[in-house]
Image (cartoon, rainbow, N blue to C red):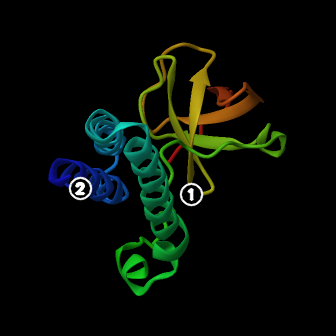
């Protein structure tokens, strides 16, 4: 009887820990321990004891899952550990719309033939039709590909 109770207690405890530790391995081990406890109960106490152990395992598992997924998220503990901050940054340059065609941009990096240009303080991925363009060159936006601007060197370079 003691081994069955120990297996059940460990199984329920591992199911409860699964909420904190991601990966599902601990929860699977907890479920296996509950199953082993039921098998031991069938072996030791027959069909009657095994049926009681199965019911107890199902009730313990359901109560544990209810506490974890219904009551725990509403608790003060969950609010303490929950992340509330958001990240406003981007991993990719912004996408431009067709209104930028015909405008002038400045090459921030060397375009060989792809690189980054700046337009109105925003950086965009760009492709140079002329091939290689040095950083700092003024370019004209002549089109838009799926995720990048298509640029070419302006015919009249401004002298500064």
- For mark 1, what is the residue? 121
In this rendering, is residue 136 above or below 134? below
In this rendering, is residue 82 above or below 18? below
Give the residue at the far top of this rendering.
131
Nearest the viewer among 71 and 58 is 58
Side of 43 relative to 106 (left or right)? left
| Local secondary structure at mark 2 | helix
1 vs 2, front mark: 2
Nearest the viewer among 127 and 81 is 81
In this rendering, is residue 131 above or below 152? above
> How far across and down, in percent of the image, does residue 115 sit?
48, 29
Quarter of the image for residue 6 reads bottom left
- For mark 2, what is the residue? 5
> How far across and down, in percent of the image, does residue 95 sit?
67, 42
User: In the image, what residue occupies the spot 59% across and 14% down?
Assistant: 130
> How far across and down, in percent of the image, does residue 55 sit?
48, 52
């Amino acid at each position: 009887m003691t081994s069955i109770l120990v297996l059940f207690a460990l199984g329920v405890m591992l199911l409860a820990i699964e909420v904190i530790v991601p990966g599902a391995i601990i929860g699977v081990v907890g479920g296996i321990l509950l199953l082993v406890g039921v098998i031991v109960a069938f072996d030791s106490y027959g069909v009657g004891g095994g049926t009681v152990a199965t019911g107890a395992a199902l009730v313990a598992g359901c109560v544990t899952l209810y506490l974890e997924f219904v009551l725990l998220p509403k608790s003060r503990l969950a609010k303490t550990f929950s992340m509330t901050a958001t990240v406003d940054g981007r991993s990719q340059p912004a996408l431009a719309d067709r209104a930028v065609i015909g405008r002038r941009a400045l090459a921030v990096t060397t375009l060989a033939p792809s690189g980054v240009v700046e337009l109105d303080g925003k950086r965009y991925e760009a492709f140079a039709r002329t091939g290689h363009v040095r950083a700092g060159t003024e370019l004209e936006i002549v089109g838009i590909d799926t995720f990048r601007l298509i640029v070419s060197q302006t015919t009249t370079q401004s002298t500064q």
